[in-house]
Amino acid sequence: MDRLIIDGGRPLTGTIPISGAKNAALALLAGSLLASEPTVLRNVPRLVDIHVMTEVLASLGMKVDATVDGALRLDASSLTDFTTPYDLVTRMRASFFVLGPVLARLGQARIPLPGGCAIGSRPVDLHLKGLRSLGAKVTIEHGYVEASADQLVGAPVYLDYPSVGATETIMMAATLADGTTTIDNCAQEPEITDLAEFLIAMGARVEGAGTEQITIHGRPRLEGADFTCIPDRVEAGTFLIAGAITGGDLTLTGVRPEHLAALIGKLQEMGAILTAPDGDVLRIQAPERLKAADVRTMPFPGFPTDLQAQIMALLAVSEGTSVISETVFENRFLHVDELLRMGANIKTEGNVAVVQGVDRLSGAEVRATDLRAGAALVLSGLAARGHTIISGVHHIDRGYEDLERKLVAVGAAIGRTQVEGQASDPAAQVPGLTR
Ligand code: EPZ
């Protein structure tokens, strides 16, 4: 199993290009099922999750090809199946996003009910409630969601919680419904707006994306489109925090600063200097040590839950006491135990963590339990004294394209080993890591 080895304590300086957004690309890939003609998606990151999603699309009869300039060409003009294999959905729960489009295109869908994951039980009741509102018959049989509708009919839908996935499911299904659908209390994340713009490019009529109400006027069919995915705000936020935690000076390119307002404000409150010298460029200059601050995760435009683990790593070495409230997921503190192994001083009570900043963390062997927890361990390793050895790297590979290469380019001493079992001195396996 791969492991990452980091020799910490080096300020990161230089420029990092930001990749396409995993969570936008996954929704766009599902949305491409709605088109009766080929679509082209650009700036799709090369990640394990994306690969799994293309396997799901292929299992439905979608033709998926890479274009000469690295884009994805997707042809859903003749889908051959309305069901996907259980093992694909267990490998990547966002595969479930194909439910709405398949139902809308074929009048029926049989998609495995996704299980929970490390960070929570991840129910899909709001997705199913939305589809029922559009007239679908939806049952759960033998672990599968069975949905059918001769013709979906537009209707008003109220979401009890502004779920990103449920908003996407209902938006996509509603584009081929007969009549108008309104989604109230919908998610307002940039990924929602990106999906809406893709649907509009395919000929759908969608209004209000990015606000608390989205209106979709259904059409009989959608055409092809050539569309570019937004940059990944969570990757960008992770690298901003890398600059902060190492007291460095990092410039991110190909980024949308307006997608990161909550994190930018928090880092400035903590004492970092952030500037946007150009429309799609963000620069962070950080002092040796930042000041503590409180963080409460909320749906967009609030502080993103997907950056909670990463900012906790930073707060663990900031000056003072911070209180972190995780209001979105019920079990998203799995990184705490690993940070404690590195010398952090953190106490949790339910969904609240109290972080007492320490001068420095010390390198240790730690395990990534989920994608963003793994990112937090990389950040801690970059700042810690000595070597940090991270196992469970497959979690990190799901969401960060070329992570080591991007970090080495700005001065990090990080490498990957494929050592089976316990190597006597794993750091010796990594070129460029000083003793
Ligand atoms: C998306 O997950 C993202 N994943 C997550 O990113 C992100 O953390 C999350 O949105 C919140 O921003 C993708 O886009 C692929 P939700 P999603 O539905 O859609 C509850 C990462 O690290 N809920 O907004 O599953 C749910 O239990 C991943 O990149 C219901 O109760 O998130 C949770 O408490 C992790 N019923 C809350 O809503 C439902 O039917 C937010 O979930 C749906 C959700």
Image (cartoon, helix red, strand yellow):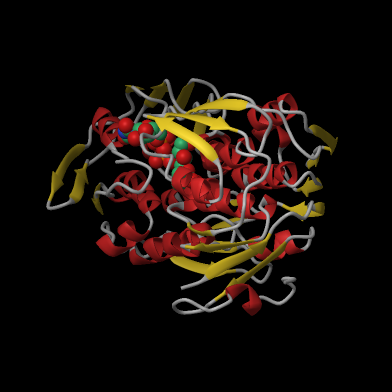
Residue at the extreme left: 142
Specify whether 427 is left or right of 97: right
Q: Nearer the viewer, residue 345 or 96?
A: 345
Q: Nearer the viewer, residue 79 or 66?
A: 66
Could you tell me how many numbered marks the image carries? 0
Residue 240 percent coordinates (x, y): 71, 43
Quarter in which the C terminus is drawn: bottom right
Residue 221 percent coordinates (x, y): 42, 44
Residue at position x 79%, y 58% from top? 410
Where ligand 1 lies, by image quadrant?
Answer: top left
Specify whether 102 is left or right of 391: left
Residue 198 percent coordinates (x, y): 56, 43
Quarter of the view holding residue 87: bottom left
Residue at position x 65%, y 78% from top? 428
Above or below, comparing residue 63 to residue 220 in the picture: below
Residue at position x 58%, y 63% from top? 46
Q: Nearer the viewer, residue 81 or 383?
A: 383
Q: Nearer the viewer, residue 3 or 252?
A: 3
- Residue 284 seen: yes
- Residue 175 seen: no
Residue 170 percent coordinates (x, y): 37, 35
